[in-house]
Amino acid sequence: MKRWLLLFAFLLTVGAQAQDYPAPIRALAGKGIVIKSTLPAPEGFKGFVGSYQGQKMPIYLLPDGKHVVIGTVFDESGSNLTQAPLQAATRRGLTEATWNDLGKSTWIAEGSTTPRRIVYVFTDTECPYCHKLWLATQPLLVGSDVQVRNIMVAVIAPQSLYRAAAILDSSDPEATLRQHEGSFGHSSVKPAKTVSAATAKRIAANIALMEELAIRGTPAVIYKDGTGQVRMVSGMPPQDRMKTVFGR
């Protein structure tokens, strides 16, 4: 018989009557957790997708119906039974609504100020592959009608958040981003000592959007093809794809 190991879990005991969801699940609302949908779960468990401050989380109602755990479920062989179902349950399609949400995110523009083509790039200041992509895009932006919008996230290292904040809160974010990339590896843009609540919220929203799109690493490139369809390339696009993305 399989034994389920639940990591990063906490137990909640409640006695309220259930309506839409079992009482222990509904009780999480008092802790600021919003239940988004159900989630496939091991036999005996009931799974749910919760959201806390924009971050998705797997929630499991235990077989006794009285306790809840939040975290990842592994089987006796160490296989992760949560990751794939959670990704499938929270993945968003690449639609016009997605494109609109990208436009509302916090980004730093480079290239044309009157673009006919827009390319979004989820980027982390400490990501060497993001830097490689940045270098590759610079010649493509010269004299073009392309605008790259760098959506700043902080997922690589502890200093990612602080350096992203230093760039976003500078008087000229585009120039500061260019300064950072131009000295990547020994950046002359020092991480901020503190991050304001407003800036932290903007970066957190970018990360939440990244997670909603099931993007698991940086860089990630999102663009519209010749037919207007929203497309994505994870990682550094291969050379033959660069022309498709940037149109040149």
Image (cartoon, rainbow, N blue to C red):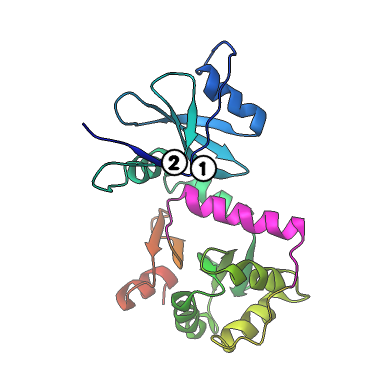
Say if mark 2 contacts mark 1, CB within 8 Å: yes
175 left or right of 26 in image:
right
Q: Nearer the viewer, residue 68 or 233?
A: 68
Q: Is residue 91 shown above or below 23?
A: below
Q: Amino acid at mark 2?
A: Thr
Judging from the image, what secondary structure is the residue with disc 2 in?
A: helix
91 left or right of 18 in image:
left
Q: Position of residue 204 (x, y in %)?
A: 62, 54
Q: Is residue 93 shown above or below 61?
A: below
Judging from the image, what secondary structure is the residue with disc 1 in?
A: strand
Q: Quadrant of residue 241?
A: bottom left
Q: Quadrant of residue 52?
A: top right
Packing grade of label 1 (10 A; few <14, some 14-19, many >=20) is many
Packing grade of label 2 (10 A; few <14, some 14-19, many >=20) is some
Q: Position of residue 28 (x, y in %)?
A: 59, 28
Q: Nearer the viewer, residue 212 or 67?
A: 67
Which of the labelled discs sits on residue 90, or is there none? 2
- Quadrant in which the N terminus appears: top left
Q: Nearer the viewer, mark 2 or mark 1?
A: 1
Sequence order check, earlier mark of 2 and 1: 1
Which of the labelled discs sits on residue 247, or is there none? none
Mark 2 vs mark 1, CA separation in Å: 8 Å
Q: Amino acid at mark 1?
A: Lys
Give the residue drawn at x 42%, y 25%: 62
**Residue topped by disc 1:** 56
Q: Nearer the viewer, residue 139 or 85?
A: 85
Q: Which residues are magenta?
A: 193-216
Taking the image as drawn, is residue 133 in sight?
Answer: yes
